Amino acid sequence: MPLHLETTRLVPRPWAESDADADDHRALAAERGDGIPSVEDNRRVIEAQLAAPARTGLALLVVNRRDTGEFIGYCGLTVGRASVDEPEIAYELFRRWHGQGYATEAASAVLDAAIASGRKRLWATVRPWNTPSLRVLQKLGFERDHVSTDDRGEVVWLTRSLAPQHPRVAH
């Protein structure tokens, strides 16, 4: 997966070992409602993101707005609950950027990169209450596969085939 992607409005890029990326990530994580992660925990998360491409060929990328350079979230591919061969697409944006098409735009670029990498299928996992994420995945062609549970409740698993679509030939 390429580590630099571009869309009309966004510039997804690798994480940097910078105070700015660390502060932005901590603020984004705090929006989840579980408190602000410690500086040390946050550094470990970013270090893991920096190491992931060399280890797996996958990356979660910082998503910045093209016009302002502002950090709005992240998007990319990760092993997550899936595998290196069939990774999970993941994205998270600050709430103030929801509803403006940014998640769909960033995830579309990641989807294109996954197709170019030769992967055959992607997964996504979402909590059933997360209607906006479910809508983004639907727009990208993901289909519901199954539901599982973990210590936090239900998890909806969606999948998207990346295999080339062959036109049907009429006989």
Image (cartoon, rainbow, N blue to C red):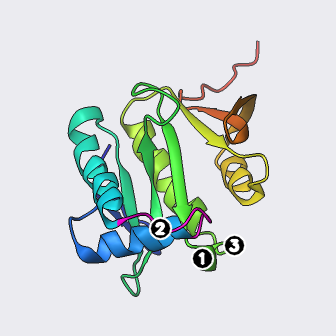
Tell me the mark number nearer the camera, choosing from 3 and 2: 2
User: What span is in magenta?
Assistant: 31-38
The span from disc 3 to disc 2 (Cα, nearest Å) is 14 Å
Q: Residue furthest bottom?
A: 68
Q: Which mark is residue 73?
A: 2
Label 1 amino acid? Trp
Label 3 amino acid? Gly
Residue 20 location (% of width, % of height): 29, 77
Residue identified by numbered label 1? 97
Label 2 amino acid? Gly
Residue 12 location (% of width, % of height): 37, 64
Task: Name which quarter of the figure residue 26 lies in.
Answer: bottom left
The answer to if 36 sits in the magenta stretch is: yes
Q: For label 1, count other residues whose C-alpha is less than 10 Å away and answer few (under 14), some (14-19) or many (20+).
A: few
Quick check: marks 1 and 3 in contact, CB under 8 Å?
no
Residue identified by numbered label 3? 99
